[in-house]
Amino acid sequence: MAGREDGNRRQGTPGGAAWAEELLEHLRPAGRDVRRVVAWLAGAVGGSVALQDAAGNLVAGTRFPLDDGLVADMTAGRIASAAWESQERHLRLIRVEHPSHACVLAVSRDTPFDRRASDIVAHTAQVIELLLTAGESTAAGHRLRRATSDLRLAILQLLMVEDTVAARRVAAGLWPGLLDADTACVYVVESDPADRDRIAEECLERTREEALVVRCPAMDGHVIVVSPRDTMGDALRSLVGRRPDIFLGGSVRQSLARTATAYGQAVSALAVAHFRPDKTAVYAERTHPERLMDPVALRGWSARLLRPLDTLPHHTRAELLATNRLGLEFTAVNAAKVLGVSRNTVRARMERVETLLGTDFDDLTVRAVVHLALNTRIGLPDAQATGDAEHPGPRLSDLLSGPAVRTWAQNLLGRLDEDARNPRRTLRTWIAAGGNAERAAQALGVHAQTVREHVRSAEPVLERQLLAGGTDLYEVVLAHLALGDLDLPVLHRHA
């Protein structure tokens, strides 16, 4: 679960994205020129910029008076940055590392430095540092590759929060045309963490950089591949076929705005891949309960359930929706790593949605129902609630009581009936206990390890990952709700 950290929220604006895109252009092979970067910085902040070394030599920019003692302290490493202000002049100095000596980047303005100008100076200093180092040591090449890897991760994080416009703009600077398509598939390649860098490089080679290849920030052994092209699946499957120790899970084709949903599908399919002889699986290989529900009724129910969020500003609402989809799919820690925020931020945003919906995410039935509503809403963002106070429209019980859903649920859970240990009862009790093995064991009068073994043994039978939570578990929860094996959750704001 998770929540609020509005003060640290990064809000994309057209102006903010523009300077970042221009700065990234200077990392491209054709644009790596420190003098050009310094000239660009002067124009971006509306001031004078000088880059000089420890001896006082001007490396780039325009010379202007600086305190020699202050510069000496900075080049010697005693001071990393400094600021000086008067009525006529505002000055910022930043130490810039160099393989053989340090330099000082000095920026002078007639007006005070606002947050935008400060961010531009700080990020430009990092770019200049990379460019000064490039070509002079092996470490420079590694850092540039790391910067590229970080850019790929930044693009993925933008897609995860549905900011496809900014993601395309950033990608266009280094990989033109990469995200021109409206849809994509997401794949997750799992290997030993020690081999991941090599596997990531092989993925880049096989996809010919026509896909977004990212080392997963949450799982050490995972490589995420966002592929707009259909041929990438075959290329990745051939990679898996050549190696005995890697697995591949893939999503169905989704819009770029649903990258987070596709990622969850790929992780779910990856769990199934472990039970397959070819070590690969695609999420579309099985039936999902939402596909068996009346789409109009499902849209209306989802819109009404999430109506309390509609009172929020658009960017806040979008941020909460994106964070909660991932927070319900993964742990708060892993969701935070994927989104590039702190876990406290994730927890605070989830707690805020709990409050708005008047419910408790500790209840697995609540998590499953809200997860269904969130994924329906992102898939059909323009859906509007139907009904009024006298005719509130379909209820959750109506959605789950359809013959197709009930048949699916009975067929799914019925797979467990042949096991004499009665894992179906254990699974039901474990879900009712919020996924807590100790509480379930106490209710059943068995050892907690027995509960875990029963749940774990149900995973290959149901072809779903249960202990890790997420979509697989929520589908099993919905099956129990459809058959009346668990009580429907209470969401106090749900009309």
Image (cartoon, grey):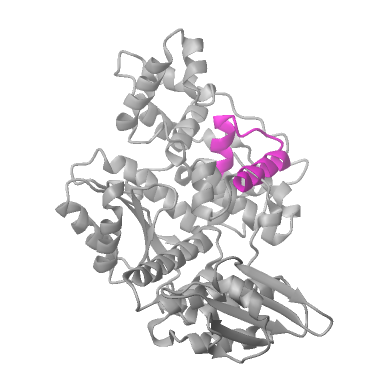
Q: Residue 290 location in percent, x, y?
A: 48, 44
Kindly give the residue lying farthest to the front in the view shown: 69
Kindly give the residue lying farthest to the top in the view shown: 445
The answer to which of 229 and 129 lies nearer the viewer is 129
Residue 430 placement, left or right of 120 = left
The answer to which of 94 and 122 lies nearer the viewer is 94
Q: Quadrant of residue 75?
A: bottom right
Magenta-drawn segment: 344-372
> Looking at the figure, which quarter contains the C terminus?
top right
The answer to which of 160 and 117 lies nearer the viewer is 117
Residue displayed at 65% across by 46% down: 349
Asked whether residue 104 is drawn in magenta, I would say: no
Would you say residue 287 is visible in this rendering?
yes
Q: Residue 340 location in percent, x, y?
A: 53, 55
Residue 32 placement, left or right of 463 = right
Asked whether residue 366 is drawn in magenta, I would say: yes
Magenta-drawn stretch, dominant element (helix, strand or loop): helix
